Image: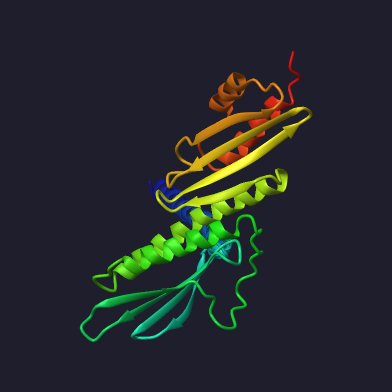
Amino acid sequence: NDSIAIMAGKRAKRARWSSMVHKKETASAEEMEISSLEQQLGALEEDIRRQSQDLESLEEKIDDLRRENDSNKCFRSFKSIQGCQRWKPVKLDKSLISIHFQGEVQEATLSASFKTTTSGDVICEVSTEKPENDRWSLSRRTPQTILPVVQSMIAELALSVKASKLSSTEDMGFMVQRITCAMGRIDSNVKELIQIKQRFPTLLVKRNPKDESLLVSVDFIVRQNMLHASFKLTKTYPYTPVDVCLYSKAGKADMNIIKRQLLKNAKPGFGYMFRACDVIMACLQIPSD
């Protein structure tokens, strides 16, 4: 029995020793696994840090590009309107604001001076003379045929502005817009008349002071055909149809064909009268039977 007990004690001792060795090996393997996981976690953290830095750098580049794009938009917007305004301030004071308006031709010029009184009233004085030492305008001179019409339109605009009453300083902005629009219409009409004059030297223009309309007459000469056309341009030009009078001075121009073609191909809009002249010229170039 003693030997059996000794053998049982030895087996138990070996079992405990084997268990301790197994536990130590298991603990060592777990420590190695934990260390490997910690290394992997460190590598992942480093990768995340690098990616965060790359993301921050990318965001900075995006912000720079966005700012550059906004700057380019502002620059393009500025370039799109640069030179489009038809006026410039000549004098800015607490009681006096003087603005000069300049059209496409030298004679299309107007200056408006807004004065504020002690009572708060606003007085508008108008002049058709250029300011002294004015180097801003590089406008071309008006052809002599059209010059009286330009001077008449500017004088009429000056009288209209002078007759307007301003109740407060807020009305000055609306007056500047009104003068700008009127100068734009004058420029549009003058440029079209100059183009027609260059193509058809027989152009004649008269101003009708009664209804403030323009009477434009053009002689078309094609071979044996000579046709006289008269256009009446009202305040609504070029947005509404114009009255056109045609009569043949020589040849056998077919008036019915010309009138039909004018109704079909010469529609209201910018360049209305120039298109009408082209249509008439094209009809006269068609050989007659």
Is residue 260 at least partly visible in the picture?
yes
Q: In this view, does 75 lie to the left or right of 250?
A: left
> Which x, y percent locates residue 286?
73, 22
> Which x, y percent locates residue 116?
29, 81
How many numbered marks does the figure carry? Answer: 0
Q: In this view, does 161 lie to the left or right of 197?
A: left
Q: Is 152 in front, or is 27?
A: 152
Q: In this view, does 18 lie to the left or right of 146?
A: left
Q: Residue at x 34, y 70 (%)?
A: 172
Q: Which residue is drawn at 64% across and 20% down?
A: 254
> Which x, y percent locates residue 72?
58, 62
Q: Residue furthest front?
A: 249
Q: Is 229 in front, or is 168?
A: 229
Q: Which residue lies furthest to the right in this view?
A: 223
Q: Is 65 in front, or is 89?
A: 89
Q: Which residue is drawn at 46% across and 56% down?
A: 20
Q: In this view, does 284 lie to the left or right of 223?
A: left
Q: Which residue lies furthest to the left in this view?
A: 119
Quarter of the image where one finds residue 138: bottom right
Quarter of the image where one finds residue 135: bottom right
Q: Which colour scheme is used?
A: rainbow
Answer above or below: position of 171 versus 195: below
In the picture, the quarter occupied by the C terminus is top right
Is residue 66 at least partly visible in the picture?
no
Answer above or below: position of 74 versus 268: below
> Which x, y percent locates residue 12?
42, 50
Q: Which residue is drawn at 37% across and 66% down?
A: 161
